Image (tube, coloured by chain):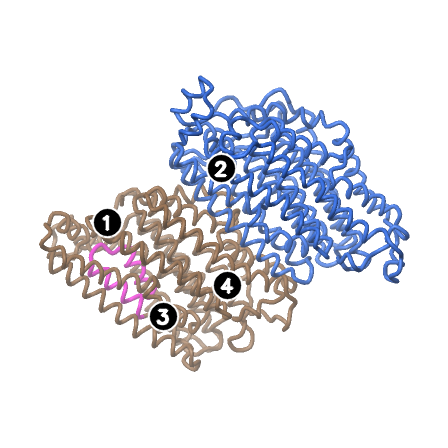
């Protein structure tokens, strides 16, 4: 796959890696600078993180070109598809940093907190560009290790530690499975390169079939774990609930974007010959995921836990796009992830605003009377929830539209039918939160931890959800166009 | 796309759709103070009503083509268009919507005292979505408005409703959403099948085979039957009606229920004509159950709003029956019934609202002898009670008699699929005349007549001028349509003729040959 024969990476190879290097170097610098910041200036690291993400996103757009740039002997690829994912990841990181500034104020070691976030972002950007299984594993582990620590960041809080430990243990197991799967594929095909593996599988006869199948299953299990696909979702509710809310916001979006993008690349270039097999596996898991996510969310009283199950449900819907495959299916995945980014971050922004004494403001009851007390936040939260439920004139409708249409087009009508039915089940727990916001009376006086940036975040995400809801055309066209080189 | 048909030089439908929305935004941003909000909402709703009037005056009743059309690309990668247009079937409902919204705003003047601003905004947004539903000619645009309607309605029932409002509104939301999502799948499947188009007119012309028609029709049935509502998916309606604030019930009964029946007329009949004929027996049975059984249920209600809600279901049974009899007369009767029910049911809910504002109870048993203290109100109430019974001279009489006559002389296409003669169906449906008299007049007797014994009732003041004012247009319309329905029938005549032709023709190639020689029963056998 290497398009140069020099033994040493040339500067243009490094240039394609510019955004990642920028974020990583910035993170290391921040780690040192933070040592010299006085205690009441620690939150400057947060502003620096936001700036780094914004600059990195611009760099991504600068560096990329319509033609895929392949670097480091085919390890790394920067195409519009990867660039799109990186912009989503960096936006999410920036918004998570905005949410963190007030949330983490007063906590010890905030510097490392932002550094971990930036390293996680670096890992996810590498995932988006991974073109070999080695790169995949490096990116994934860099991301995962940082997120394990972020989940357990509030060391003194028991549930935070418990969540982190659970996530770490299960995550390590998943990484093991992933490596195991990769070793099978390498053993059979003799390559780590996605395209080479794909070619080898396509040309090999049935004699390697069993090992390839085992490899595929373990590989998928490892990747689907990160996406909280049922039955690998067990860690999700605990991790979401235990993590600081901005981290929950971060991990509800960014790793999902990176994971799906990576999965699309793996399925499209390494496993196209096994399409029939993986579609069968993914279809069953998609149904299970939609069921688990949407049904279990009903029983939750804690909104972070509810949104954890909601994420699982949404991952199930996104999987329909993955199963459908092709330009329409993958474009559906990207549309869904983009819209989901706004919805989820908007909702978590409001949840982290609601933080009162200690870690309250997370129970559904705590939302009672929000619309009365603060009509703006009430409306924004209601819009996010209706959008998550997939009601038209909000972006969430078009996200579902895109994946359902792709699924039907690919001949998976029954999956689309199951999907819409579970979306009705899902609507119940979203509109139940609206009930607390609009129908109930305020019980405890609200005390918001807000600042201008957070207000702007709520406003921007709300406007984005409505704007995409009314004019979805540009986003859909963009998502289709970034896939041009891939499928 | 051929030439767009819009005799007016400006996009009147877009204006009708977005004027209330723009008004709602303006009220949200700029208007402070409850009184100012009320007046502003009234101004916006009246302006919208005025804007929709040219639809009636400039309407060309001689053609079945869509009029006042607008067409702009919306999502070009999926060929979704912003395509609007009305014919004689949809146009009256737009006017009904804009009129009832004005009445809703006026009726809420005094009884809504909390969150007035949100209330008015919700109603104006609701008006936008309703006019959008009736003017959309792109299936995705239709679905867009159809579902968007849920948001304001959810809030209207949930915030300003009665004691059990949360249960009622969540039930309403989930029922309707559950019905609609299957329609979405049907729309997407049609898009893929019919060569990537969401255009209603093109889908009407596309020859879906019988297998496809059956599944599409069933998916539509679920969506529309919930909205109508037809037995057995009607159970959300009594709860929603009872718990909704007066104006919410008015819009629910007046417009929302019509959306389902409109869906049958706009989608089921023209897109799936063969399936529509095939399923005539099913619709007939469900309609008769609605007419007879639900009427009996209505009789036993102790809550006035619940009674009217059940009465609405029974009347909508007439509408679905007429729709699927596939004769000019029956379909026109169904539409007249829908419009008439929009006036009558709305007015009955307003009447209950007038009493509720005074005593804050909806139970029949809490009243009695109201005529002694509220003579004007009793007279107004009587007009609409009689209209609900379909007394000759009222608009509902025209609708019901047309449906019954149309059923008696039902089309060969519908008859071919029924085991019994449609005469028997008509006789079954005619029991409604007796049953509706039973439940309506019995309720009227218990509430309005009798001795004035309750102290609470003694203290009820008669209607104010404002309250009387919003009944005047309704009385005028009910009587006018009852005595001289010709203008309304004229408007829909050409469109219904076209619709009946579409619904009676077959989309199956083999049937076309048989139809040439008039072998209608052989066509039925083909299926």
Q: Which mark is residue A276?
A: 1
The spot of residue B201 in percent (x, y) is 49, 29
User: Sequence order check: which comes first, mark 1 or mark 3?
Assistant: 3
Is A196 left, or right, of A383 in this rendering? left
In the rendered view, tell whether residue B388 sits above or below residue A59: above
Q: Disc 2 vs disc 1: which is toward the camera?
A: 2
Which residue is identified by label 4? A349
Residue at disc 4, secondary structure? helix
- The chain whose colour is blue is B
Which residue is identified by label 2? B279
Discs 4, 3: same chain: yes
In the rendered view, tell whether residue B391 sits above or below residue B41: above
- What tint does the image give chain A? brown
In the rendered view, tell whether residue B273 sits above or below residue A69: above
Is A484 left, or right, of A218 in this rendering? right
Q: Residues within 10 Å of mark 2 (few under 14, many from 20)?
A: some
Q: Which residues are magenta?
A: A119-145
Q: Chain of mark 4?
A: A
User: Sequence order check: which comes first, mark 1 or mark 4?
Assistant: 1
User: Sequence order check: which comes first, mark 4 or mark 3?
Assistant: 3
Q: How far is mark 4 from mark 3, CA to CA?
A: 22 Å
* Circle 4/circle 3 CB separation < 8 Å: no
**Res A145 → quadrant:** bottom left
**Res A369 → quadrant:** bottom right
Q: Chain of mark 3?
A: A
* Residue under the point 60% across and 58% down: A376
Q: Which mark is residue A235?
A: 3
* Circle 4/circle 2 CB separation < 8 Å: no
Q: Chain of mark 2?
A: B
* Circle 1/circle 3 CB separation < 8 Å: no
């Amino acid at each position: 796959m290497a398009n140069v024969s020099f033994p040493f990476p040339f500067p243009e190879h490094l240039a394609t890696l510019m955004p990642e290097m920028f974020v990583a170097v910035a993170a290391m610098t921040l780690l040192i600078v933070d040592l010299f910041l006085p205690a009441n200036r620690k939150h400057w690291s947060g502003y620096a993180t936001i700036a780094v993400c914004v600059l990195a996103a611009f760099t991504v757009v600068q560096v990329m070109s319509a033609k895929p740039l392949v670097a480091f002997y085919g390890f790394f690829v920067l195409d519009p598809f990867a660039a799109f994912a990186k912009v989503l990841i960096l936006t999410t990181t920036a918004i998570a940093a905005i949410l963190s500034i007030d949330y983490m104020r007063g906590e010890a070691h905030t510097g490392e907190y932002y550094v971990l976030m930036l390293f996680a972002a670096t890992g996810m950007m590498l995932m988006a560009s991974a073109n070999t299984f080695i790169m995949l594993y490096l990116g994934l582990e860099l991301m995962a290790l940082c997120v394990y620590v972020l989940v357990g960041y509030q060391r003194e809080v028991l549930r935070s530690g418990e969540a982190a430990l659970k996530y770490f243990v299960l995550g390590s197991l998943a990484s093991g499975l992933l490596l195991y799967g990769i070793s099978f594929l390498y053993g059979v095909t003799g390559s780590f390169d996605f395209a080479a593996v794909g070619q080898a599988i396509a040309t090999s006869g049935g004699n390697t079939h069993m090992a390839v199948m085992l490899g595929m299953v373990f590989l998928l299990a490892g990747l689907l774990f990160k996406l909280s696909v049922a039955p690998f979702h067990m860690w999700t509710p605990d991790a979401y609930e235990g993590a600081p809310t901005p981290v929950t916001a971060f991990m509800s979006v960014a790793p999902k974007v990176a994971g799906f993008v990576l999965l699309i690349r793996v399925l499209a270039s390494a496993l196209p010959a096994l399409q029939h097999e993986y579609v069968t596996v993914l279809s069953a898991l998609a149904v299970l995921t939609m069921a688990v996510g949407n049904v279990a969310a009903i029983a939750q009283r804690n909104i972070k836990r509810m949104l954890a199950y909601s994420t699982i449900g949404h991952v199930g819907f996104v999987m329909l796009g993955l199963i459908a495959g092709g330009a329409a299916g993958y474009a559906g995945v990207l549309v869904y992830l983009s819209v989901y980014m706004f919805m989820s971050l908007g909702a978590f922004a409001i949840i982290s605003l609601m933080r009162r004494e200690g870690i309250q403001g997370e129970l559904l009851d705590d939302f009672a009377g929000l619309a009365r007390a603060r009509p703006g936040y009430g409306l924004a939260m209601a819009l996010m929830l209706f959008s998550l439920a997939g009601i038209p004139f909000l972006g969430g409708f078009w996200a579902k539209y895109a994946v359902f249409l792709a699924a039907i087009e690919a001949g998976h009508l029954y999956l689309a039918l199951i999907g819409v039915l579970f979306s009705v089940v899902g609507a119940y727990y979203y509109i139940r939160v609206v009930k607390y916001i609009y129908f109930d009376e305020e019980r405890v006086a609200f005390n918001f931890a807000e600042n201008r940036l957070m207000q702007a975040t709520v406003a921007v995400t709300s406007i984005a959800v409505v704007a995409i809801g009314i004019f979805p055309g540009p986003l859909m066209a963009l998502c289709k166009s970034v896939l041009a080189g891939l499928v | 796309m051929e030439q767009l048909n819009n005799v007016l030089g400006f996009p009147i439908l877009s204006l009708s759709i977005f004027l209330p929305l723009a008004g709602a935004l303006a009220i949200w941003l700029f208007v402070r103070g409850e009184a100012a909000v009320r007046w502003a909402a009234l101004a916006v709703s009246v302006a919208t009503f005025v804007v929709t009037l040219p639809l009636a005056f400039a309407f060309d009743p001689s053609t079945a083509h869509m009029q006042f059309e607008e067409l702009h690309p919306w999502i070009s990668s999926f060929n979704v268009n912003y395509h609007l247009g009305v014919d004689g079937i949809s146009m009256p409902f737009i006017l009904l919507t804009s009129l009832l919204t004005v009445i809703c705003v006026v009726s809420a003047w005094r009884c809504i005292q909390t969150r007035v601003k949100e209330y008015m905004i919700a109603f104006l947004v609701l008006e936008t979505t309703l006019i959008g539903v009736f003017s959309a000619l792109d299936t995705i645009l239709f679905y867009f408005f159809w579902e968007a309607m849920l948001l304001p309605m959810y809030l209207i029932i949930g915030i300003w409703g009665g004691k059990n409002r949360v249960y009622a509104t969540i039930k309403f939301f989930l029922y309707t959403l559950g019905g609609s999502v299957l329609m979405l799948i049907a729309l997407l499947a049609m898009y893929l099948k019919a060569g990537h188009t969401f255009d209603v007119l093109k889908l009407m012309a596309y020859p879906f085979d019988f297998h496809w028609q059956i599944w599409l029709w069933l998916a539509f049935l679920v969506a529309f039957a919930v909205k109508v509502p037809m037995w057995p998916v009607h159970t959300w309606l009594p709860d929603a009606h009872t718990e909704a604030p007066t104006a919410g019930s008015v819009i629910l009964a007046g417009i929302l229920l019509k959306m389902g029946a409109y869906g049958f007329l706009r989608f089921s009949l023209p897109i799936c004509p063969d399936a529509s004929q095939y399923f005539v027996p099913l619709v007939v049975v469900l309609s008769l159950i609605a007419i007879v059984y639900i009427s009996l249920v209505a009789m036993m209600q102790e809550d006035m709003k619940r009674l009217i809600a059940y009465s609405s279901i029974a009347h909508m049974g007439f509408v679905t029956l007429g729709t699927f009899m596939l004769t000019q007369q029956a379909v026109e009767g169904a539409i007249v019934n829908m419009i008439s029910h929009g006036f009558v049911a709305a007015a009955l809910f307003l009447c209950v609202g007038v009493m509720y504002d005074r005593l804050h109870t909806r139970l029949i048993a809490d009243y009695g002898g109201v005529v002694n203290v509220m003579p004007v109100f009793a007279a107004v109430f009587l007009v609409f009670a009689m209209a609900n019974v379909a007394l000759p001279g009222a608009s509902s009489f025209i609708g019901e008699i047309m449906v019954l006559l149309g059923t008696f002389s039902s089309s060969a296409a519908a008859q071919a699929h029924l085991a019994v003669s449609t005469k028997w169906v008509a006789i079954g449906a005619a029991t409604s005349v007796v049953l509706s008299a039973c439940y309506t007049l019995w309720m009227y007797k218990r509430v309005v007549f009798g001795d004035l014994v309750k102290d609470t009732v003694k203290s009820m003041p008669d209607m104010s001028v404002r309250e009387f004012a919003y009944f005047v247009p309704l009385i005028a319309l009910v009587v006018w349509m009852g005595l001289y329905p010709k203008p309304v029938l004229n408007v829909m005549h050409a469109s219904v003729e076209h619709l009946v032709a579409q619904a009676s023709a077959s989309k199956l190639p083999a049937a076309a040959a048989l139809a040439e020689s008039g072998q209608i029963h052989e066509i039925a056998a083909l299926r």
